[in-house]
Amino acid sequence: MAQFRVDVTGVGLTQLPIAVAAFRGDDAAPQKIGAIVQADLERSGQFRALDATGAAMDEAARPDFSLWRQKGADSLLVGSVTKLADGRFDLRFRLWDVARGQDLGGEKYAVAQGDLRQSAHRIADFVYEKLTGDRGVFSTRIAYVTKAAQRFNLWVADSDGENPQSALNSSEPIISPAWSPDGSQLAYVSFESRKPVVYAHEVANGKRRLLANFRGSNSAPAWAPDGRSLAVTLSRDGGSQLFLIDAAGGEPRRLSQSAFIDTEPAYARDGRSLYFVSDRGGAPQIYRMPAGGGSAERVTFTGSYNISPALSPDGRWLAYVSRVGGAFKLHVMEIATGNTNAITDSSADESPSFSPNSRLIAYATQQQGREMLMTTTLDGRIKARLAGQAGDIREPDWGPFQKP
Amino acid sequence: MKRILLAAAFSIAIAGCGSAVKLDDVSVEDKSGTPVGMQALAGPVPASTSAALSRSAIAPIEVGSKAGTGAAGAAGAATAAAARTVFFDFDSFAIKPEFQVVVDTQAKLIKADKNRKVMIEGHTDESGGREYNLALGQKRSEAVRRALVLLGVADSQIEAVSFGKEKPAAQGTDEMAMAKNRRAEISYR
């Protein structure tokens, strides 16, 4: 059983109290469904899990509401997991509104063993959506890179960092993974040919293609929201400049025209504007220009080193990394007002990426010299360390909502 | 006391699986929830078609040398590297006078063999973001490329690329290590 670590800081949080009973059959099942669901809900920052130890019940039983009310629960999740004759697992659950004594519904799946965790995340999504009204992101996937014993590995993992599956294993570095908008492909920068080259990689079947392998360095892929093209940084004309390239490959079109560094493109989700980093003002700052190219306006004004822009899917927030007194800290800006907050206490934050419901940010940081991945709520109050492989872990990119 | 909830829809779901079970009906007062089973059959997760096949499976690829290449080579290689490396000051892309001899020597070697292709690999220290450092390393490699071209090297023989902070020559976070990592290496392939 993996260890889940969720740190809650700050007082006065409004969190929904929920009891998640161990699923009947959890003991015999390869995955502890109740524990996975509970950790998901806690990591979201929206829920406070109550102790449900010893509750022996499943989706078929009507609970004793007064007992759960006494424990302070507003809602209760119960379910069961049963191995079927064909080797699959029958997974069922029901969510109860304890306060009102109401059945909030449930679902039933028959799934392969390898999909049990994914199904547990879907249950957490069901609960999250029923109780918050927002779409849950627990069944989405996160890509990240590990470095261990001079091997670099690109992983696709569950949104809690668990269940990692290797997409690419290389003796040379891999950086900047970026999910395609439909969640089927990862674009990334691989140094396997002893220079940075951009690939697009279909994760389900391992098919990949060279997207950008031009003279000089090729890096920083960012999918346009329609998935048809990508913005990349190329140095083929001398200097790092932004280009647009078709998702099928082909001749790139230059987007930026400066004698400075222009890199780290990131599309606004409406596809109309492109954020990027440039040192045209003497130090790296975040700028914004029309997606087709054109005049750029500066977006960050505080600090002398602002990099790695990430836009929230709802269009409201810009996350980026800012150097403050020698420390690199994750910041969140409300785009409409320009109000900005540093939301971490760490000093080597990198690579922010929003969850598809815009409620969480995944990022890389360091603690005691080890690289690790974290998630945080946008106010920085709820942080969780994501599980992962041994070795240094970095470069998270949070994938889109999965197609049903 | 717990009462047993036996939603009618549940039996429909089970019937759909080919094993209909007659259920005693204990009524549930509140019908506002969606019964288990109904939603399951039309639900968001279609049942996996096979017990062995996971629908979220990833197909892995392996590339590069199996053993992995360490940053430090043999002692001989390290000595040779010194003659091909230009070091830079913090946040600088200017070739310092003491490294002009590296550029001069390499320019002669490259010009002597017109078929020779050479990569100039820019590197940075570990401070800051990976992509921005890639762009900074590119500025260093291009500074060396321009210096070579000024000495008469054909641009077609040389390519300037960057590894950013991904391939440090020295491990560590102290200034000594950082200074060793701010470099451009001229690499014969």
Image (cartoon, helix red, strand yellow):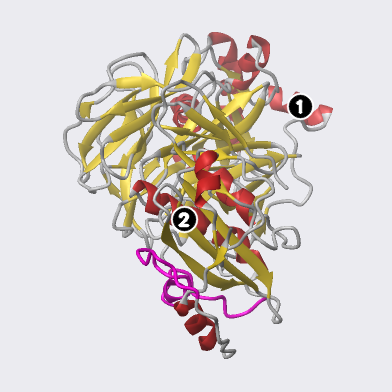
Task: Give the quarter of the image for residue B76.
Answer: top right
Residue A76 sits inside the magenta stretch: no
Mark 1 nearby-residue class (10 Å; few <14, some 14–19, many ≥20) = few
User: Mark 2–mark 1 contact, CB under 8 Å?
Assistant: no
Q: Which residue is mark 1?
A: B78
Quadrant holding the C terminus of chain B: top right
Residue B33 sits inside the magenta stretch: yes
Q: Which mark lies nearer to you, 2 or 1?
A: 2
Q: Which residue is mark 2?
A: A96
**Pick the front one: A5 or A176:** A5
In the image, what residue type sits under mark 2? Trp
Identify the residue at image location x=62%, y=64%.
A80
**Pick the front one: B106 or A216:** A216
Magenta span dominant secondary structure: loop
Q: Vertically, is A298 above or below A192? A: above
Task: Give the quarter of the image for residue A74.
Answer: top left
**Pick the front one: A72 or A282:** A72
Residue B111 visible, this orientation: no
Identify the residue at image location x=69%, y=44%.
A389
Q: Which residues are magenta?
A: B26-51
Q: Vertically, is A64 above or below A105? A: above
Q: Vertically, is B49 above or below B130? A: below
